[in-house]
Image (cartoon, grey):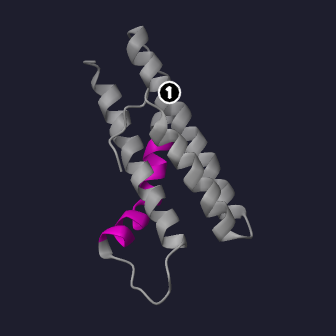
């Protein structure tokens, strides 16, 4: 697929998934162990990455049917992850909603249409 928008949106989605996975891992972290710096850095980038992904997901795409289908699938994934993250933030039980967020992340990763790199 030659459409550079597909690669760009896929990159933004991949970064978002990385930061959300880091957030879930930190939520389950044992207090006695220090959180590794790369994990902490990924969590720190979450708001920036989420904003970027949401801006891209709000765009209207045109072009080849293959490109539009790929972009639509990625946009849908971004929206699902955003809703799961908002639910995670609003819920009183962080551990329980971290599991739900982790489940949505796994669904997005498993979607072969998105072609995300393995974690």
State the residue in front, 40 or 59.
40
Q: Residue at x 48, y 33 (%)?
A: 111
> Which residue corresponds to mark 1?
73
Camera-nearest residue between 28 and 12: 28
Residue reaching furthest to the left: 2
Query: Where in the figure is residue 79, as x and y percent of width and height?
Result: 58, 39
Extreme top residue here? Answer: 64
Whether 86 is drawn above or below 35: the answer is above
Q: Is residue 78 visible?
A: yes
> Magenta region's main secondary structure?
helix
- Residue 70 position (above or below residue 62): below
- 113 up-or-down from 88: above or below: above
Towards the viewer: 30 or 86: 30
Res 55 visible: no
Point out the stretch of residues depicted in magenta: 38-55
Quadrant assignment for the N terminus? top left
Which residue: 43% across, 9% down?
65
């Amino acid at each position: 697929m030659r459409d550079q928008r597909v690669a760009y949106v896929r990159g933004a989605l991949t970064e978002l998934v990385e930061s959300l996975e880091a957030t879930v891992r930190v939520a389950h972290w044992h207090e006695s162990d220090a959180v590794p710096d790369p994990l902490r850095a990924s969590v720190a980038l979450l708001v920036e990455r989420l904003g970027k992904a949401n801006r891209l997901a709000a765009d209207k795409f045109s072009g080849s049917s293959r490109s539009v289908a790929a972009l639509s699938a990625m946009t849908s994934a971004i929206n699902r992850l955003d809703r799961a993250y908002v639910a995670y933030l609003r819920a009183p039980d962080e551990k329980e909603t971290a599991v739900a967020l982790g489940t949505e992340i796994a669904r997005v990763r498993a979607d072969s249409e998105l072609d995300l790199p393995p974690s």
